[in-house]
Image (cartoon, grey):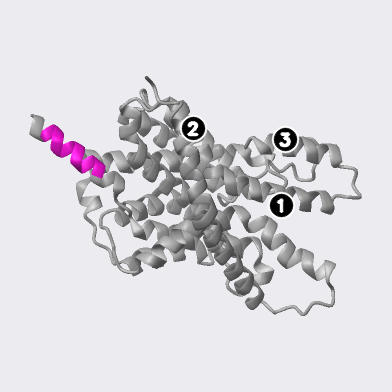
Amino acid sequence: MACVATHRAERTAEERSRSFHILNVLRGLAAMSVITLHYPQAFAPFVASGAYLAVDLFFVMSGFVLARAYDVRLQDGMGGRAFIVTRLIRLYPFYILALALGTVELAYYYRNDHLAAEIILSSVFNFVMLPSPPVGIPYQPLFPANFVAWTLSFELFANAAYGFGFGVLTHKRLGVIVGISGLMLLALALVRGNLNGGAYWPDAHLAAIRVTFSFFVGVLIHRARETGKLAPLFSVNLPQIIIIAITVGALGSPISPVLRGLFDAACVLLVFPLIVAASIGRNPVPSRGMCAFLGEISYPIYVLQIPVFRIGVMGLPKLLPGLPQLPAPWSGILLLAALCTASWFMATRIDIPLRRRLNAAVLRHLQPG
């Protein structure tokens, strides 16, 4: 019995330290696809029309990765508060940088619209990663200075439910949560005609349902893998290029509006969970440097895309009308390359060392006993 326990502990430690490199590739490509969708004028004709679905793929991968890293720690008494602190430490540095840049741009954009009080109020809420109240900023964005930040806020809510509710989130209850939220997503996709939404108050309910299904299905994928359930699914040995091609096709294929809702539902409910399951069925080793690069830059380029591309694509031509402008897609590619390079430098030289020090300093005081 002791040998079995020892073997399980060694296997758990090995699995927690294992890096699924293909997930880093998918994460980086998905983040770039979102940027082409938000700024088509800079990337045309290379625009991923369904890149808003990348958010759902992010949520599935996040659920799997966090469950793999923290299920055992939470079971051993880590505690929900310590878990949430680690998540805040992971997300906050780049988030605050993007919020600061975006707030300056927002204030400049609305400088003649007498919205100073509304911008200050929204920034106070957004500073603590809470949605801004619908107080008068046009279209009622949850995060006016950086509208993609809704995904981080709602994922953090899901993280809190996972961390604080770990003891009661059994496989059966997770299955019920995933089943109900999946049916709701299917209904919304068919009624709305797509699953593109979540950044504004009128469709905030869609944000909650998207993150609930995809994040917790990621947690279930990890637990099914650990318990040996659905074992054939995790032994699928698809070549990396096939996994990448399916993901790119899901995010970038032009789909008829008539079929868009059904296509979106199929991607979120079936394709993305299967992609993640197939990706973790093996541990690809070629091009580890590129995999690491794409993995490290995926978060910073995603959270910084709005303030950086807003000034690069929309602001500079107005501020400096005599500045020569590259045509699309070269202007977008050049700006994206600069953002990727800066993100890699900041992630490896500033963010990662800072997070290590913060985790060591803060979590020491939060551990029980």
The span picked out in magenta is 4-13
Give the mark toward the camera: 2 or 3: 2
Residue 247 coordinates in the image, percent (x, y): 42, 62
Tell me if I can see residue 53 in this picture: no
Which callout, 1 or 3, points at the residue further toward the start of the chain? 1
Q: In this view, does 318 lie to the left or right of 191?
A: right
Please determine whether, in this image, residue 140 is positioned above or below residue 321. Answer: above
- The label on residue 124 is 3
Residue 150 coordinates in the image, percent (x, y): 61, 43
Element class at badge 2: helix
User: Quarter of the image holding residue 176?
Assistant: top left
Tell me if I can see residue 284 in this picture: yes
Of the residues shown, which amino acid type is indicated by label 2?
A: Val
- Dot 2 surroundings within 10 Å: few (below 14), some, or many (20 or more)? some
Q: Main secondary structure of the magenta part?
A: helix
Give the distance between the C-alpha atoms of the residues marked 2 and 1, in whole angstroms: 27 Å
Check contact, mark 2 vs mark 1: CB within 8 A. no
Where is mark 2, residue-wise? Answer: 362
Toward the top, the furthest residue is: 369
Please state which of residues 40 and 95 is positioned toward the viewer in this rendering: 95
- The label on residue 101 is 1
Q: Is residue 28 left or right of residue 339?
A: left
Give the mark toward the camera: 2 or 1: 2
